[in-house]
Amino acid sequence: MNDDGIEIEAIALSKPGGREHNEDAHGLWHDGRHVMAVVADGAGGHLGGEVASTVVRSSMLTGFARAPSLEESALRHLLDQANRDVVARQAEGGPLADMHSTVALAAIDLYTRTLVMAHSGDSRVYLFRDGAVAARTTDHSLVQEMVASGMLDDEGARLHPQRNVLLSALGSASEPPVIGVSAPTPLWPGDVILLCSDGVWEPLGDVVLRQTLQAALNADHWLALIDARLQALADAEQDNYTALALFVQPGDENRTRLLAPGGHPL
């Protein structure tokens, strides 16, 4: 890496799949040095899931903007606050009473070229390096517990009938959510970070994500390939699916270029 800094190209894809409503939410904030990317997957029936994921996105991005930090304690505080914000909205009752949301976030310091991943639930953050999975978050789910105990491998977990049973999510009033925060990881030009809901990684698996990345001509093309694969597998019960990809590139200055598919502002 040279001393000219890095540039991040951000590309987003979010669709309802076979559902009437898209209960996923995603967002990105940056100030020229710090970057926060978030994907949240809401649940709770009509309206509830959409509200939960939107509350989580707003809470995370607003909180990070007030005091950008990659410190573990700061990121844990952001997730704890997002949990409290969802619980506060649950008190309104009706369709919001049982809502909750997973969350996956990537916090980046462009000056130190550092990434920290954090999550609760089964939305994931991946770090790809040289076309391979260099790191990813570990789901807070029943099948992940089975993997940890040796009862299942990752492929078996992806196809297991209880794969959607979560052990943690935001929206818990009785006990704090389980929160995972990674150690700081150096970023290099060529690295790719993917945040996604389970509607992406569950039907495709890590192998297809890796293969499509290796085949992609650029960031926009990769999400187009992911979208095509998901549509080829689609049925009436297809889950919402959201992917937010961050491509790390060498830059002339520390800056962030934010694009959605087709080159439009994210």
Image (tube, rainbow, N blue to C red):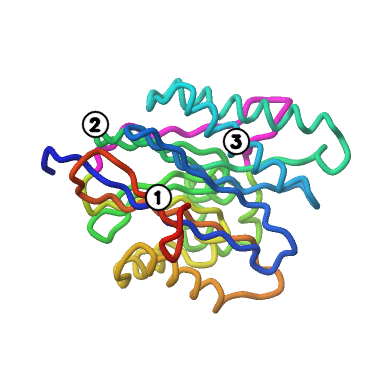
Q: Is residue 251 magenta?
A: no
Q: Secondary structure at mark 1?
A: strand
Residue drawn at point x = 71 percent, y = 48 percent: 50
Q: Secondary structure at mark 3?
A: helix
| 266 relative to 99 in the view: left or right | left
Q: Which residues are magenta?
A: 167-187
Tell me the tag on residue 112: 2
Residue drawn at point x = 29 percent, y = 70 percent: 217
Of residue 249 and residue 226, the one placed in the foreground of this image is 249
Q: Position of residue 39 (x, y in %)?
A: 53, 46
| 110 relative to 158 in the view: left or right | left
Per the image, the residue denoted by label 3 is: 58
Q: Decide: few, some or many residues near mark 2? Use Cα within 10 Å; few <14, some 14-19, many ≥20.
A: few
Given the image, on which type of amino acid does mark 3 rest?
Answer: Ser
Residue drawn at point x = 19 percent, y = 40 percent: 5
Q: Position of residue 191 (x, y in %)?
A: 27, 51
Q: Is residue 2 above or below residue 111?
A: below
Per the image, the residue denoted by label 1 is: 258
Residue most extreme to the right: 94
Of residue 25 and residue 160, the one placed in the foreground of this image is 25
Q: Decide: few, some or many residues near mark 3? Use Cα within 10 Å; few <14, some 14-19, many ≥20.
A: some
Of residue 45 and residue 174, the one placed in the foreground of this image is 45
Residue drawn at point x = 71 percent, y = 73 percent: 236
Q: Decide: few, some or many residues near mark 1? Use Cα within 10 Å; few <14, some 14-19, many ≥20.
A: some
Q: Is residue 34 above or below residue 193?
A: above
User: Considering only order in the chain, which callout, 1 or 3, is on the residue closer to the N terminus?
Assistant: 3
Q: Quadrant of residue 54?
A: top right
Q: Is residue 170 magenta?
A: yes
Q: Pointers 3 and 2 in contact (CB under 8 A)?
A: no
Given the image, on which type of amino acid does mark 2 rest?
Answer: Thr
Given the image, on which type of amino acid does mark 1 rest?
Answer: Leu
